[in-house]
Amino acid sequence: MVMNDIIHKIRERAKSQLQTIVLPESQDARIREAAEIIEKEGIARVLLLEPGRIDVEKKEKYSREFFRLRQKKGITLEEAREIISDPLYYAAMMVRDKSADGFVAGAFYTTPEVARAAIRCFNLNPQIIVASSCFIMVLPDTTWGEKGVFVFADCGIVPHPNSEQLACIAISAAELTREVLEIEPRIALLSYSTKGSGRGGAVREVKLAVELIRQKNPELLVDGELQVDAAIVPEVARIKKADVILEGRANVLIFPNLNAGNISYKLVQRLANARAIGPLILGLNRPCSDLSRGCSIEDIIDCIAVTAIRAHSQQQFGDGSL
């Protein structure tokens, strides 16, 4: 499968299950051009949210709902109204209200801003204790991962995940792998150590996370702790005696912390000329996606298509209670 095949497949699936995706960054020329292409090609129904055209009645409704959600944090109704005046929060509340099926932002807003809006307006998936993010990485060299495709997590939200958080990040990433890519996840929890070759608290955290994943989801194919070469290169996996479960063919890579994840996805994207779709926000009961502020028009289209697929899947299989 060459790079364009998986992208084509994602976009065609989005077309076949048309969803409404709201975009709160209408001032960005890349967003406007991507929206035109998406509408023309029928990938999704797009709502460009312009600050001056926000519905006054809905804004008040969303402000009161947001106040209800956050009043225990000390927020006032007037502060809630001010927050919902921000198109990013208005868009998130539209998705909560099911006036839209998902939102995509990040061309202007930072990742922390997008993540905060999503976390504050949505609920966590009942089985997941942490919101996280992942990238779908599509490499031109199809000998790696799943014919050139990987899922990397977490690359955008959780700075120093503990074992339970790592386990939830892995489970969330595996779910997205099945849901969007329709492939069976083979999950490697990465470390500077392979099967006891190194020691330290960070290694113990990864080992415990693997145990927790197996307890929570025994059907998942997961192994760790693994150095990245033992995770993705069969010959190295054999040499390091790490070939029993994944056989050096991992397609979902879980990084031990945000430093490792963020640096790794950017290196692979730039040095291997890979397509990076995301960051896709995981663990919530409504779908949304962040964008890199350096995103291209194609990046925006891909994120919208993936968000649309996830929205349809949540509608089919349930999304937890709000």
Image (tube, rainbow, N blue to C red):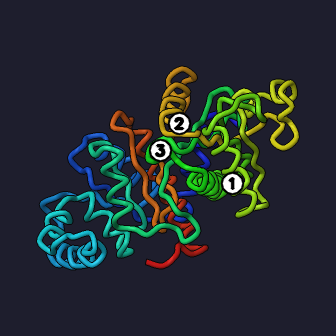
Q: What amino acid is labelled 3 in the image?
A: Gly
Q: Residues within 10 Å of mark 2 (few under 14, many from 20)?
A: many
Q: Secondary structure at mark 1?
A: loop
Q: Residues within 10 Å of mark 3 (few under 14, many from 20)?
A: many
On the question of residue 29 being in view, the answer is: yes
The answer to which of 188 and 166 lies nearer the viewer is 166
Percent across and percent down for residue 71 are 24, 75
Q: Secondary structure at mark 2?
A: helix
Instruction: Tell me how far mark 1 sits from mark 3, CA to CA.
Output: 17 Å
Q: Which residue is mark 3?
A: 278
Mark 3 vs 2, N-terminal side: 2
Instruction: Tell me how far mark 1 sits from mark 2, CA to CA.
Output: 23 Å
Q: Farthest residue in the front direction?
A: 200
Q: Secondary structure at mark 3?
A: strand
Residue 151 vs 320, above or below: the answer is above
Q: What amino acid is labelled 1 in the image?
A: Glu
Mark 1 vs 3, N-terminal side: 1
Percent across and percent down for residue 83 are 19, 63
- Residue at left offset 41%, top offset 62%: 102
Q: Residues within 10 Å of mark 1 (few under 14, many from 20)?
A: few
Q: For this view, does 281 lie left or right of residue 237?
A: left
Q: Which residue is mark 1?
A: 182
- Which is in the foreground here, disc 1 or disc 2? 2
Q: Which residue is mark 2?
A: 261
Residue 78 vs 281, above or below: the answer is below
- Residue at left offset 78%, top offset 61%: 218
Q: What amino acid is labelled 2 in the image?
A: Gly
- Residue at left offset 61%, top offset 48%: 9
